[in-house]
Image (tube, coloured by chain):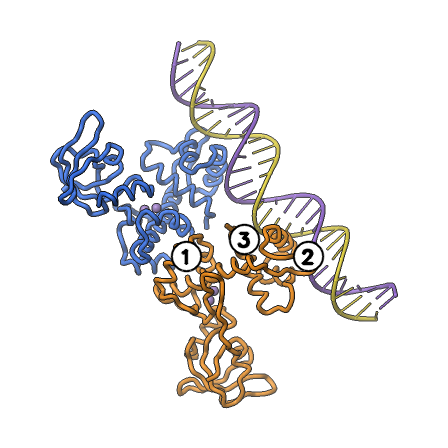
Chain colours: A orange, B blue, C yellow, D purple
DNA sequence: ACTTATTTTTAGCCTTGTCTAAAAATAAAA
DNA sequence: TTTTATTTTTAGACAAGGCTAAAAATAAGT
């Protein structure tokens, strides 16, 4: 059984591994967790002792299979709880992350088994992120950033990269949510901005926005 | 905001105050929490600093109004989560306590407001214990122990004092649960045992069992 | 009232997880 | 290849919460 702090470290390293080639650096972990590099070094050494990750001084860390599975378990709980909060308690998708950060640390296998069943075995959370299965496996779908699309391409929104409340509320104002179909009407080269069509509305999208929206081309 | 440890102390003291005249003793808290008296003294002094209870050396403690309200808030959460686990996730009433012990420490006003609504504003938890309202008030119903009834009296089971898994499963085997109607057919003076009727079954009930079942006479 | 037993508090130590400041290793620049 | 900058680790400290052993109060017995 792992402590709240240990679980948070494993989860963070798991996420950082996704978009990093090679080991995860001490500083990147510290940044993401809003803590100091020295604290990270301590914890990383402790987790290495426990066989959750491999670590060589000054070389960064990589999760072991056990570590990756544990991390996926925490993420599974996080995302299932987010589904519960949105689907059952009718929270808005920009309100659930902080609460799920707490709920993900509740220890009970049986609870998650039943929650998963109660929710109808969902595959994705309210932000379009895949929910790992019982064994920590995630089936990855090929999705790309809206910014990668070119003029005239059509896509359906399947997720968000940024999950800040501000960004999600911004999307709401434009009636963009998971499942929204959109078409790229134009794209400016010099600043990466786009004009897109959603339903019968057309509007301007900044580069930053386009780089934080995942779509599947259709 | 209070730490998990602080919330557990407040909750325990709240419960001990119910069946104690005068201040709650250091040792009684230690016993209930499976900890050492010296640890209790430390924490009690800290909580006194914070104005959650009044404390005089060697004299025991009493919750302040603030302390009592905070404790009731934790108990409210505990019991609402138990209702969720039983009503929605179909847990058995003897399986939910440990999980609720964890869930009661999730910090989110909004979450509890919505959960309460989702559950239909229940007044009692699965063990028949009253759920404090938003302000920490509990409307107490007059219930008595089955052991207080005399021959021929009829009652309906409204709660359990013991909540151990063993006791609850024992009750299940005899088809006794919250709402069960029963009649005292006989009572032995020398050992306090009883013969009771439940539906068309009659059976023997030990003194210990009778002292852990709450009933309302009808 | 005096002695013994029990309860409660204090003093000192430990673990977890954090921090700051300083040292060591690695990477970048000149 | 030196020198400089950045990253990472170590050393030492601290707060929360717990424990053990010893001292101090209070309660019980005689
Ligand atoms: Mn989240
Ligand atoms: Mn999410
Ligand atoms: Mn309970
Ligand atoms: Mn209960």
Expressed as whole percent of the image width and height from the top left, the position of residue C25 reads 76, 57
Secondary structure of the residue carrying tag 1 is loop
Mark 1 and mark 2 residues within 8 Å of each other at the beta carbon? no
Q: According to the image, label 3 marks what residue?
A: A5
Mark 2 and mark 3 residues within 8 Å of each other at the beta carbon? no
Q: Is residue D22 above or below residue A175?
A: above
Q: Report the residue at 41% width, 57% height from top.
A: B108
Mark 1 to mark 2: distance in Å? 40 Å
Furthest residue in direction left, as rendered: B152
Mark 1, ligand 1, within 8 Å: the answer is no
Same subunit: marks 1 and 2? no
Dot 1 crowding, Cα within 10 Å, few <14, some 14–19, many 20+: few
Q: Report the residue at 65% width, 66% height from top.
A: A22
Q: According to the image, label 2 marks what residue?
A: A56
Of residues A25 and A137, the one drawn nearer to the viewer in this rendering? A137
Of residues A140 and B138, the one drawn nearer to the viewer in this rendering? A140
Same subunit: marks 3 and 1? no
Mark 3 to mark 1: distance in Å? 20 Å
Expressed as whole percent of the image width and height from the top left, the position of residue B45 reads 48, 37
Q: Report the residue at 49% width, 67% height from top.
A: A138
């Amino acid at each position: 059984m792992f402590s709240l702090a240990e679980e948070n470290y494993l989860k963070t390293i798991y996420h950082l591994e996704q978009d990093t080639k090679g080991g995860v650096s001490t500083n990147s972990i510290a940044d993401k967790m809003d803590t100091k590099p020295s604290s990270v070094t301590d914890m990383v050494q402790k987790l290495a002792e426990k066989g959750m990750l491999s670590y060589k001084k000054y070389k960064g860390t990589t999760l072991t299979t056990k570590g990756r599975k544990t991390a996926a378990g925490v993420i599974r709980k996080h995302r299932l709880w987010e589904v519960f909060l949105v689907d059952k308690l009718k929270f808005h998708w920009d309100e659930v992350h902080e609460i799920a950060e707490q709920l993900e640390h509740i220890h009970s296998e049986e609870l998650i088994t039943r929650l998963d069943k109660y929710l109808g075995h969902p595959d994705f959370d309210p932000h379009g992120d895949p929910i790992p299965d019982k064994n920590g496996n995630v089936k990855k779908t090929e999705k790309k950033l809206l910014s990668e699309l070119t003029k005239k391409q059509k896509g359906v929104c399947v997720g968000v990269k940024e999950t800040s409340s501000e960004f999600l509320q911004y999307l709401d104002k434009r009636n963009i949510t998971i499942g929204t179909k959109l078409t790229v009407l134009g794209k400016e080269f010099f600043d990466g901005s786009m004009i897109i069509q959603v339903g019968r509305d057309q509007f301007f999208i900044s580069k930053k926005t386009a780089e934080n929206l995942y779509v599947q081309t259709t």
